[in-house]
């Protein structure tokens, strides 16, 4: 899978994904999100238009990037069973503050987002341009 | 007249150089060259006067010229094997120098280089035998060459040209050397020299280092690193002999690094395999071994764990104090290995406990989610389809938390797709879940699956897909649950062909028997080999 990153404005970054997103590479997507955040991004558009497949690991990656933008570190499965989860922050995910915006999911990817219930958590736009516009004005 | 005196055949200074070379590569080495009458002709330790005062354990080698013994070499140092090697080399060099006459200086110089190289490589190979990682090996290399090639500042770069595996010298000196050596390393990289012929010397333009010597650590398998040495200005330049020595050392070290890397990967692989195997055993142990036997109902399942990936589970259980009600679960954890197995075991227990509260599947999954989100943040999520079936009435209540759609194959061949709203478990506090209710009439079958079915891949990379799955289900109208399960498993296997399964495959079918059907023989099969059935 290829990952592209752009920063159309100081606090908005666009991460483009091309190929298949699964358990073998989802951490690279999280790393890209972390790098964008460290580069100043407050909102990240994830452009899904180039994906031919997204497994449940893709959902983990999207959620982890949302956590990163809220200043939290995503919990790693290797950390084991500890830590009280910040309930308040994650409950508000997507509703009040769309830090992560999804763009252009192909039908199969939209299906994965829909049936896992992720569509209700993050705004989805038909294409990159409108997603960036929404992220910039928010 | 007798045999010639050794000290007449070869100058003391040449002998001293030979002995000094020996002690440079084997620190603490003491060596003596004695004339045949016992006079000490050369020694690393001038305090020794005669053969009688050699320490115990000294290796002795006679020096023979024209068939006559003209003297002897005595060596005592780190260990007998190295001592013997060095003694052998010194002895041979002296014999050559003595017989070559006019060429003895050249012979001696060449012998000194051979001696250095040989002893160095012996010592290196002993030290490398115990080094298990690239950084350790790099450290060994630097400490081994620092004396014979000293004085020098040095460092070893990893294969990425950025990571420092080992350094020798002050941080300041090493940093300066890195800067000075950058162009040399780049030039070497561009030339892409063949294995074993890749050491270069350069004279940098600044005042700190007189010469720089660099070589790659390379094997047929690839580039493993770069060794760079810098000799301070005024301390003498690196010679061609030094370059040769470093190249030999690099060759040996490269093989050691490659071997260490392979071993590391093997160990890592074994550890990973072991973790996956343990996770796998936990998962299999949690699968139901038999289903409740209920009049008028058939329950069948398939469970095919993939080799590496894991996370599916399914369950059928009686709900406490709810008479004819049974709970049905099909679920899929993100992730694999032990963390996924733990989440799976936990989810299963939580679902059972919550279901016994009797609040219905929506309430059950909401409870489970709250506990997992509040108390057990693990970075893993689980999709769950959970239904409660009243086997007396056929009423089924279904809650779906992010899981693949469920299906009902009606007796008349209609296929209903059930995708009530609900978010996957473990991510956020609110599942936004709405349960649905339906009635299973005689001949109807309720089917749950995981994406191991629909996302099975053929050798050319295409997906089995929902269309094919639904078409097959529709074609299976009227068959017993076990037959339906077997048909799906066979069709997916045929589609997959030789391709390796990339995910666990799980299928659960609960069918209400048609009014006229007779009882089927019940069977209990180990879930690990394909599933269970009962009717």
Image: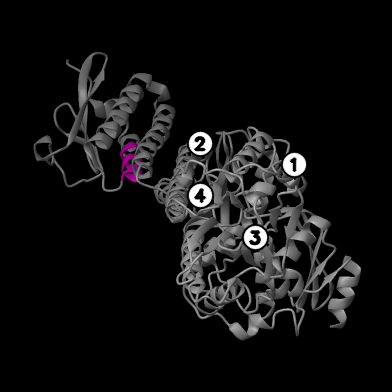
Please tell me which of labels 4 and 2 falls first in the chain: 4
Point out the frontmost of discs 4 and 2: 2
The residue that label 2 is drawn on is: B244
Point out the frontmost of discs 3 and 4: 3
Instruction: Please report the bounds of the magenta region as a residue range.
Output: B18-26
The residue that label 4 is drawn on is: B236
Tell me whether the residue at label 3 lies in contact with that at label 1, contact meaning CB atoms closer than 8 angstroms: no
Residue B251: image x %, image y %?
49, 37
Task: Look at the magenta stretch and give its main secondary structure.
Answer: helix
Q: CA gap, disc 1 to disc 4?
A: 67 Å
Point out the frontmost of discs 1 and 4: 1
Point out the frontmost of discs 2 and 1: 1
Residue under disc 2 on the same chain as residue under disc 1: yes
The chain identifier of the residue carrying mark 1 reads: B
The residue that label 3 is drawn on is: A57
Q: What residue is drawn where x is 31% and y is 35%? A: B15
Point out the frontmost of discs 2 and 3: 3
Q: Is residue B458 left or right of residue B95?
A: right
Q: Is residue A118 magenta?
A: no
Please tell me which of labels 2 and 1 falls first in the chain: 2
Q: Secondary structure at mark 1?
A: loop
The chain identifier of the residue carrying mark 2 reads: B
The residue that label 1 is drawn on is: B462
């Amino acid at each position: 899978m290829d990952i592209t990153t752009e920063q159309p404005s100081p606090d908005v970054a666009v991460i483009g994904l091309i190929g298949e997103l699964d358990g073998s590479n989802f951490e690279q997507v999280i790393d890209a999100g972390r790098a964008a955040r460290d580069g100043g991004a407050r909102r990240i558009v994830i452009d899904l238009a180039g994906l031919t497949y997204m497994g449940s690991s893709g959902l983990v990656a999207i959620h982890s990037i949302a956590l990163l933008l809220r200043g939290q570190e995503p919990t790693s499965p290797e950390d084991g069973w500890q830590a009280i989860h910040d309930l308040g922050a994650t409950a508000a995910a997507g509703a009040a503050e769309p830090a992560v915006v999804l763009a252009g999911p192909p039908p199969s990817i939209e299906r994965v987002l829909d049936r896992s219930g992720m569509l209700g958590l993050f705004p989805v736009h038909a294409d990159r341009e409108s997603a960036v516009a929404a992220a910039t004005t928010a | 007249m007798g045999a010639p005196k050794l000290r007449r055949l070869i100058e003391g200074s040449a002998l001293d150089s030979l002995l000094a070379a020996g002690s440079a590569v084997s620190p603490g080495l003491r060596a003596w060259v004695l004339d045949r009458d016992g006079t000490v002709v050369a020694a690393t330790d001038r305090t020794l006067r005669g053969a009688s005062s050699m320490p115990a354990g000294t290796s002795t080698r006679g020096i023979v010229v024209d068939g006559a013994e003209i003297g002897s070499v005595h060596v005592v140092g780190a260990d007998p094997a190295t001592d013997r090697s060095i003694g052998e080399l010194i002895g041979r060099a002296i014999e050559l120098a003595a017989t070559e006459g006019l060429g003895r200086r050249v012979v001696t110089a060449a012998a000194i280089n051979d001696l250095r190289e040989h002893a160095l490589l012996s010592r290196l190979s002993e030290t490398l035998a115990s080094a298990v990682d690239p950084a350790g090996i790099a450290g060994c290399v630097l400490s081994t060459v620092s004396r014979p090639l000293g004085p020098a500042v040095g460092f070893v770069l990893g294969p990425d040209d950025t990571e420092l595996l080992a350094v020798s010298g002050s941080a300041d000196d090493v940093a300066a050397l890195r800067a000075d050596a950058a162009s040399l390393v780049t030039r070497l990289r561009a030339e892409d020299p063949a294995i074993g012929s890749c050491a270069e010397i350069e004279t940098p333009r600044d005042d700190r280092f007189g010469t720089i010597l660099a070589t790659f650590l390379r094997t047929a398998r690839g580039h493993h690193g770069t060794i760079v040495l810098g000799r301070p200005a005024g301390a003498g330049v690196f010679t061609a002999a030094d370059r040769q020595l470093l190249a030999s050392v690099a060759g040996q070290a490269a093989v050691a690094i490659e071997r260490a890397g392979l071993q590391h990967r093997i160990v890592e692989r074994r550890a990973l395999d072991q973790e996956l195997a343990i996770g796998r055993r936990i998962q299999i142990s949690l699968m139901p071994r038999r289903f409740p036997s209920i009049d008028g109902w058939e329950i069948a399942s398939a469970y095919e764990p993939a080799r590496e990936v894991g996370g599916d589970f399914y369950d059928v259980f009686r709900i406490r104090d709810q008479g004819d009600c049974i709970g049905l679960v099909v679920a899929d954890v993100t992730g694999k290995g032990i963390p996924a197995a733990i989440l799976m075991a936990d989810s299963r227990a939580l679902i059972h406990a919550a279901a016994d509260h009797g609040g219905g599947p929506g309430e059950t999954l909401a409870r489970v989610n709250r506990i997992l989100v509040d108390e057990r943040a693990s970075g893993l999520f689980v999709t769950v389809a959970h239904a409660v079936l009243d086997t007396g009435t056929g009423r089924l209540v279904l809650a779906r938390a992010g899981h693949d759609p469920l299906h009902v194959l009606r007796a008349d061949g209609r296929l209903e797709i059930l995708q009530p709203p609900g978010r996957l478990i473990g991510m956020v506090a609110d599942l936004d879940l709405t349960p649905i209710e339906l009635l299973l009439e005689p001949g109807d079958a309720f089917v749950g699956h995981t994406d191991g079915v629909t996302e099975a891949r053929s050798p050319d990379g295409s997906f089995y897909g929902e269309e094919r799955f639904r078409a097959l289900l529709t074609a299976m109208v009227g068959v017993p649950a076990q037959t339906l399960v077997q048909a799906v498993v066979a069709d997916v296997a045929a589609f997959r062909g030789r391709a390796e399964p990339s995910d666990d495959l799980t299928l659960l079918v609960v069918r209400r028997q048609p009014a006229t059907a007779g009882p089927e023989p019940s069977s209990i099969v180990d879930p690990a080999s394909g599933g269970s059935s009962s009717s």
